[in-house]
Amino acid sequence: MATLNGIIRSYQASARRAERDRQRKAREMARLFREQQKQQDFDDATEAVHNWTTYTQMLKALHREASDPIDWNAIRKTPKPVQPEYSTLRKLSLKSYWITSNQLSLIKCWERWQEK
């Protein structure tokens, strides 16, 4: 028959075993997590390299397929464009920025009426 001390020792031994198992499982989970993180970092780096390679290849292709060279001297020798004349509405909107949208619509209507 088991004595009280034997029962207590047996209980303590099973508690220590359970604690060791818990610690071993925690270490195993931590190791698995570190491995997953390492794999995720590797996958992220691989994807970044792939994206960069694709980007640089696109840029190289863009430069290879560029249009004809531009003759900047010919462009420089062309006459300058004529200075545009501003309408009354444009002059008002440039000079007086405080005009409200309602006043602006009235001015537009007035200009249309004068054109007729």
Image: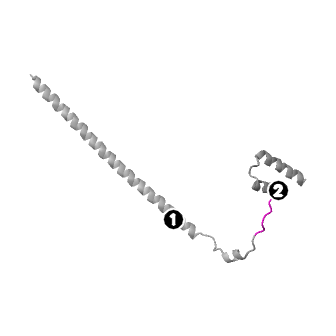
The reply, left or right, for residue 57 in relation to residue 80 is: left
Front one among 33 and 75: 75
**Quadrant housing the N terminus:** top left
Where is residue 41 shown, x and y percent of the image?
Answer: 39, 53
The reply, left or right, for residue 10 in relation to residue 71 is: left
In the rendered structure, find residue 88 and report the number of the disc placed on it. Answer: 2
Label 1 residue SS:
helix
In the rendered structure, find residue 69 and report the number of the disc placed on it. Answer: none
Query: Does 37 sit above or below residue 16?
Result: below
Query: Does 104 sit above or below residue 74?
Result: above
Q: Is there any visible trace of residue 71 in the rendered image?
A: no
Q: Residue at x 88, y 50 (%)?
A: 113
Query: Does 104 sit above or below residue 58?
Result: above
Answer with the quarter of the image where residue 12 lies: top left
Answer with the quarter of the image where residue 61 lies: bottom right
Mark 2 vs mark 1, CA separation in Å: 52 Å
Q: Residue at x 19, y 35 (%)?
A: 17
Label 2 residue SS:
helix
Tell whether position 84 is magenta. Answer: yes
User: Which stretch did the figure color magenta?
Assistant: 81-88
Q: Residue at x 46, y 59 (%)?
A: 50
Amino acid, disc 2? Thr
Q: Residue tagged by mark 1?
A: 57
Where is residue 64 shown, x and y percent of the image?
Answer: 56, 70
The reply, left or right, for residue 27 in relation to residue 78 is: left
Main SS, magenta residues: loop
Q: Local crowd at mark 1 within 10 Å, few (<14), some, or many (≥20)?
A: few
Front one among 58 and 81: 81
